[in-house]
Image: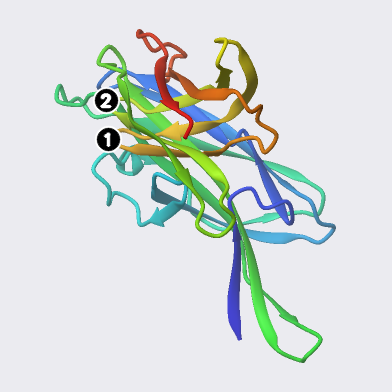
Amino acid sequence: MFLLLLSAYAQMGIGVSPPRFDLTLPPGGEVTRTLTIFSREGEAQQIVPAVHDWLMDANDRIEWLPPATIPYSAAQWLEMTLDPFALQGHATKTVRFTLRLPEDAGLNGTYWTAIALATEARPHTDAQGKVFATRVRAMVIVYVTVQGTEQPGAELQGVTVVTGEEDGRRFLVADVANTGNVYLRLNGELRIVDSAGEVVRRAQLPERVLLREGLVRYRLPFPEDLPQDAILAQIEIQPKGPAGGYGGPPLYGEVALP
């Protein structure tokens, strides 16, 4: 028998609201918040809470880690009851947690962790008679930023055009590096410009998360119906810090189309 773990916003079993907390506290400050877990099934389920650290690579792949194992972990400051509890079918239940910063003048910027709420493993048998177990895990991300120490910063690096080896399709590739001490949320736009300087195509970019000391890589396919006189690709990224501000102009890059 093997265990199949369905994680992070799986649309089955259970769900959570809100999926994210953005907290701002001074050193020594504390706050208590409440989240809601809800059941999408008719049967009662046993829920097992846990706290995890996590990291995200440049392509948005998340690695879940034991608590208090990353440089900017907030796990050691998060307090909650980790005893398993019953969640009735098609019901909701509130879960409270407290985040308490230590009195440490050296704290600065953003720290983060995650609350995991997982169902107990359930055995299943497939059509071939193989037995496996499934467990659904819903994750709630918790960010905490030390009040008055925010220094947001980001840099757009290496804007290039690459061609896929298999199908010959062209992509704009660009990296955004976090040069500050807070996490950022990135929104932006890709534009295609013709020889007359007119924007002939534009596409909004999905929001991305850029962790402290992190990197986000964009690999954006160009539209297949580009005009013959399209000569330039532009990318513009607008970062937003924990409080919604950034303090700098949008990040801008451009590259000539081959």
Question: Tag 2, which secondary structure?
Answer: loop
Q: Secondary structure at mark 1?
A: loop
Closest to the camera, between mark 1 and mark 2, is 1
Question: At 51% across and 52% down in the image, what residue appears?
Answer: 164
Spot occupied by residue 127 in the image (x, y as percentages of width and height): 81, 86
Q: Residue at x 35, y 57 (%)?
A: 66
Local packing at callout 2 (Cα closer than 10 Å; few below 14, some 14-19, many 20+) is many
**Residue for point 59% across, 36% down:** 222
Report the residue at 63% width, 22% height from top.
202
1 over 240 or under it: above or below: below
The amino acid type found where label 2 is placed reads: Asn
Residue 161 relative to residue 181: left or right: right
Pick the front one: 205 or 27: 205
- Which of the two labelled residues, at mark 1 and mark 2, occupies the earlier sequence position? 2
Quick one: which residue is furthest to the bottom in this view? 129
Q: Considering the image in quadrants, where does the N terminus appear? A: bottom right
Q: Position of residue 221 (x, y in %)?
A: 57, 40
Amino acid under label 1?
Glu
Q: Is residue 63 above or below residue 60?
A: below
- Label at residue 119: none
**Left or right placement of residue 3 versus residue 92 in this view:** left
Q: Is residue 175 visible?
A: no
Closest to the observer: 154 or 127? Answer: 154
Residue 196 appears anywhere in the view: yes
Which image quadrant for residue 203? top right
Q: Which residue is mark 2?
A: 181
Relative image position of residue 81 (x, y in whole percent): 48, 47
Q: Residue furthest left?
A: 106
Residue denoted by label 1: 213
